[in-house]
Image (cartoon, rainbow, N blue to C red):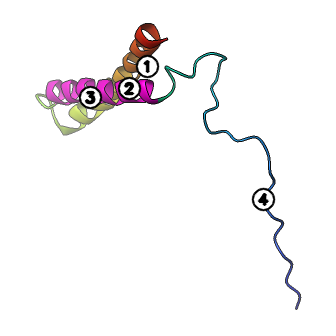
Amino acid sequence: MTFSRRAPPQEGPSLHGATSRPGAASSDSNMGMLLSFIGATVVGSVGWWLGERVGFMTAFMLSMVGTGIGMYAGRKAARYYFD
């Protein structure tokens, strides 16, 4: 029985800090992630609060929708104010 060695990892360009569009490093970095987190937390909590009046699954679904909206709004705010 023979065992083959695995090839060492290829050296190549790092994806750390890569952005989807040129010049977008500031809003897609720490401030964008922070505002995205804050927006997701606040709007997701509001969605849960509104949905719990109907039931658990409605609260869960509205919380998920609110989380997505909060993330989008947080990133949008970071691009508007910090770019």
Magenta stretch?
A: 30-51
Label 2 crowd bin: few (<14), some (14–19), many (20+), radius 10 Å: many
Q: Is residue 29 left or right of residue 6?
A: left
- Asked if marks 1 and 2 touch (Cβ < 8 Å), the reply is yes
User: Is 15 covered by the magenta stretch?
Assistant: no
For image coordinates 62% across by 26% down, the residue present is 19
Distance in Å between CA atoms under marks 3 and 2: 11 Å
For marks 3 and 2 on the same chain, the one whose residue lies earlier in the sequence: 2
The amino acid type, in three-letter code, at marker 3 is Gly
Q: Residues within 10 Å of mark 3 (few under 14, many from 20)?
A: many
Mark 4, residue position: 9
Q: Position of residue 50 (x, y in %)?
A: 16, 24
Q: Which residue is mark 1?
A: 75
Callout in the foreground (3, 2): 2
Please name whichever residue, 76 or 26, is drawn nearer the observer in this view of the structure.
Answer: 26
Q: Of the residues shown, which amino acid type is indicated by label 2?
A: Ser
Residue 35 vs residue 53: left or right? right
Q: Name the residue type under label 4.
A: Pro
Asked if the residues shown at circle 1 and circle 4 are in contact, with their CB atoms under 8 angstroms apart, the answer is: no
Please give the residue where the numbered disc 2 appears in the rendered image: 36
Contact, mark 3 vs mark 4 (Cβ under 8 Å): no
Nearest to N terminus: mark 1 or mark 4: 4
For mark 3, what is the residue? 44
Q: In the drawing, does residue 6 fall left or right of residue 63?
A: right
Membership of 44 in magenta stretch: yes
Can you say whether 10 is above or below 69 in the image? below
The percent coordinates of residue 33 (x first, y second) are 42, 29
Residue 5, how many percent across, how many down?
84, 76
Point out the residue furthest to the bottom here: 1
Label 1: how many Cα within 10 Å (few below 14, some 14–19, many 20+): many
Classify mark 4: helix, strand or loop: loop
